[in-house]
Amino acid sequence: MPELRKDPIIGRWVIISTDRKLRPSDYAEMSPPVKEETGGFCPFCPGNESKTPPEIYAVRQQGSSPNGPGWLVRVVPNKYPALRIEGELNKKGIGLFDRMNGIGAHEVIIETPEHTRQMHDFDQDLLEKVIHTYQIRSLDLKKDPRLKYSMIFKNYGREAGASLYHSHTQLISTPVTPKRVKEELKGTQWYYEYKERCIFCDIIEDEISRGERVVTVNRDFITLVPYASRFPFELWLLPLRHSPDFDSILDGERQNLALMLGSVLKKLMKGLCNPSYNFIFHTAPNRFLHPGYWQTIDKDYHWHIEIMPRLTRPGGFEWGTGFYINPTPPEEAAQFLRELVV
Amino acid sequence: MPELRKDPIIGRWVIISTDRKLRPSDYAEMSPPVKEETGGFCPFCPGNESKTPPEIYAVRQQGSSPNGPGWLVRVVPNKYPALRIEGELNKKGIGLFDRMNGIGAHEVIIETPEHTRQMHDFDQDLLEKVIHTYQIRSLDLKKDPRLKYSMIFKNYGREAGASLYHSHTQLISTPVTPKRVKEELKGTQWYYEYKERCIFCDIIEDEISRGERVVTVNRDFITLVPYASRFPFELWLLPLRHSPDFDSILDGERQNLALMLGSVLKKLMKGLCNPSYNFIFHTAPNRFLHPGYWQTIDKDYHWHIEIMPRLTRPGGFEWGTGFYINPTPPEEAAQFLRELVV
């Protein structure tokens, strides 16, 4: 059972992962290149369905059976989960310290049966199916009252922390609202109390009128390089319609999100020579469980996707201060990506 | 002039570094291995003093002249500083956003004239001189009323963000107290208000009595693996004597700090096969400038060094949540390092 431990000074939770326990000698063999398209066994390829835990959900061709080939998108529990769905939360103190059982969900969304095709090469229809799968899993996990937050994220490439090449996304649901999410919620709430407006809606309007940090806009979405980008070529992809929850996305919006995500990833891949990247869905917590505390969230929070190419490595300064050094002005990054034809 | 920009949502400052501006094509050529001992020009080697900006401070052999050979430890401004010492702070708003000129200091402490010797191989005398140099530079920078915080940190190895091989430490002074530091100060203050004790003093006492997370103790210092370690083999090196400021360290303590830092780095190098690592000095801000706000800090804050081997790469989950997944239980890491003979 993984264990959650809370830092007594700054209140940050850490998952001590017992399922994928690593001993000192394991680290010497780490950092292998992510298994490339050729050679090696891939547990995510069709025909190897028995090498993953049984599937939770799949988009399948008619007539195909669960846990066999014939799927287009497949969702399975992570074989080495950071958090486990079984058990009770069981919070307790140990002297100065706090711990909790590592309850939660850790799922893998296998986005395509094709081993070598990556998300920036997906056709529109597949990307829509993948986004729909995110939505379906996110809605389903909201039914578990132990889970406070679901985060959808992708690690592409070695520098971004990927360990398998076959295109996939992860979804982790946590029994506490993560610190970084709380900070964002606090910021948006503070702004709303002061202005009675959503800060993201204000930023979108401001950025559209300036234009200099906008990469692309369609009927439902905008992609921009944020004013205070931590990383070079960091991107935020936001819905134009105010909405706190990603999983309340409408059918037509899903189509336009797939169009924009595909085009933005193509731009990154072409313009920056296939960089590693992370993307992270920032969405509201499962707040129907906490009706009092989150009363303003429907008005003040605005879901979005943050995309971070891994072009520089954070050093001691970034780790120690929470301050970032970004060597590429956001306006130049935006202009470069805006003008790039894909 | 570098520019500081504040994220309007969570209040995080970012340095947009104009001096080391990188264009898209630069990233393709990045991530070269850190220049190894053989070959290549090194601006930190004796004889190449003219290739760095003029020195700020040096420990020199008698009769040698500034900016020539004959030094043992040498401090120079960073040639491509994240922040610059010249100019005015000049805070201003731009619509929704806040910016500030990038005023600050960015110094490099070249720790040895020998190109191939790394800190874990320093003799006791040199390590004491290096630590004394940190202290002298830290005290000197406190005289500048524009600077609120000085952070001493080391990036060793490529995974830790190092770009030059020759052993060195960096010191960055910032015109704002960094977010991550404020969080720590807030946590210690909150604990002090509640308990009227320093949380670090309590942790030290608790850890010594348990023993399971202690790596080593001497007369003045302790090294332990923190209860909620974010990273495998993360280490905290703390003074036993309560003191908020690293730069108030006494002569005898400096000796014992050098002893312990040297031995702990040797253990990491031997036990984990020469891993990349960062270390970061966590010390109180230059609070004599803010007598009201920081009134409790002398009692509640406790300086220390955090050492983080770079054995795993944070992915989207860590970036998005501020939650960390650590695959090695702290108790096992401590036992391994405690029993390792160096």
Image (cartoon, coloured by chain):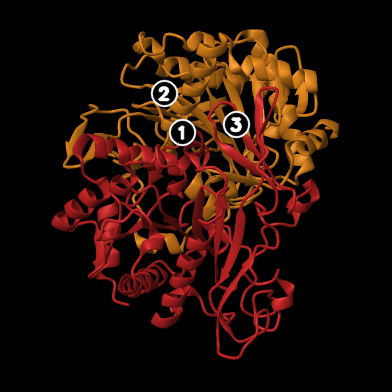
Chain colours: A red, B orange
Dot 1 crowding, Cα within 10 Å, few <14, some 14–19, many 20+:
many
Q: Closer to the observer: label 1 or label 3?
A: 3
Name which residue type carries label 1: Thr
Name the quarter where the C terminus of chain A is drawn: bottom left
The subunit letter for the residue under badge 2 reads: B
Q: Please, is residue B44 above or below residue A164 in the view?
A: above
Circle 1/circle 3 CB separation < 8 Å: no
Tag 2 and tag 1 share a subunit: no
Dot 2 crowding, Cα within 10 Å, few <14, some 14–19, many 20+:
many
The residue tagged 3 is A7
Provide residue B249's location: percent of width, then percent of height. Answer: 58, 11
The residue tagged 2 is B149
Name which residue type carries label 3: Asp
Q: Nearer the viewer, residue A228 or B317?
A: B317
Q: Give the residue at x 36% y 8%.
A: B291
Q: Closer to the observer: label 2 or label 3?
A: 3
Residue A321: assigned label: 1
Q: Dividing the picture into quarters, in which one does residue B281 lie?
A: top right
Q: Dividing the picture into quarters, in which one does residue A8 lie?
A: top right
Provide residue A196's location: percent of width, then percent of height. Answer: 20, 40
Residue A123: assigned label: none
Q: CA distance from mark 1 to mark 3?
A: 17 Å
How many discs appear?
Answer: 3
Q: Secondary structure at mark 1?
A: helix
